[in-house]
Image: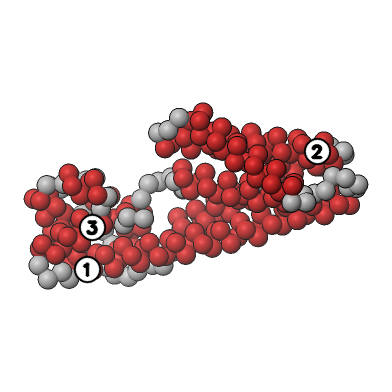
Amino acid sequence: MKPQILEDIGKKPLNGPPRSAPMADYGTLRSKRVLDPIDRFSEILFGLIMVLTVTCSLSVTGADRRSVHTMLLAAIGCNLAWGIIDAMFYLMACMSERGHKYKLLQRVRRSADAAAGRHIIASAMPPLLASLLPLPDLERLRRRLVQMPDPAGQRWLTLHDWYASFWVFLLVFLSTFPLVIPFIVIHQPSLALRVSNGIGIIMLFVLGYAFGRHAGKNPWGIGVAMVALGVAMVGLTIRLGG
């Protein structure tokens, strides 16, 4: 992940006085969206795969309400635990990214000469953007970074980070329920399993379609490919004894 601070500053006009912002505010220069689309897709897909693995482990032959109840508790408990773990990983990634930004800024400010500072900035940018940025603009960007006031302090995590981690937890945990509801309302385990798998396949297609649109690819093709992956996963799980 490229340091966002350089991309955010690069989007602003390079003329005029440098922006005065405490270092603690640098983490808020990102998009106002809680999670990026890729983050949302991956979290929902992760939760979906987890719950499909649990539901398909149910042997419908001779299954009774007790075994279905045990499976439901396992599915909900599994995604609850992994939602918490994934939220913790998200917070760790936020701390790592913020620390890297701070370290990068200090490297630019402490560089031995202007050329070294420009090289650090260009290395942190996407290659295409760095190749299109003229040398004078890159130098003005370096000067703006150097002229920024010294940070008063460095916060490990912001309120936005905690809020986003909560959404990570929700996306993983809530993805459980569309697939377990059939087992609650349908009393025949084999039919409930088929309905649950059908819902999972539909969700996989929707995720693939949305991902394809975001990535600029054929959404229908990506959706079908995601369904094929889901069908293969469900079939493999059942084949192995689910």
> Which residue lies under the disc numbered 1?
107
Q: Is residue 29 visible?
A: yes
Q: Mark 3 vs mark 2: which is more N-terminal?
A: 3
Quadrant placement of the N terminus: bottom left
Report the front residue among 91 and 154: 91
Q: Mark 3 vs mark 1: which is more N-terminal?
A: 1
Task: Report helix, strand or loop for mark 2.
Answer: helix
- Residue 123 bears which disc, if any? 3
Q: Position of residue 178 (x, y in %)?
A: 69, 40
Task: Report helix, strand or loop for mark 1.
Answer: helix
Report the front residue among 164 and 129: 129
Looking at the picture, which amino acid does disc 3 mark? Answer: Ser
Q: Position of residue 219 (x, y in %)?
A: 48, 30
What's the CA distance linking mark 2 and mark 1?
A: 59 Å
Do the CB atoms of the residues marked 3 and 2 lie less than 8 Å apart?
A: no
In-image side of 169 versus 80 (left or right): left
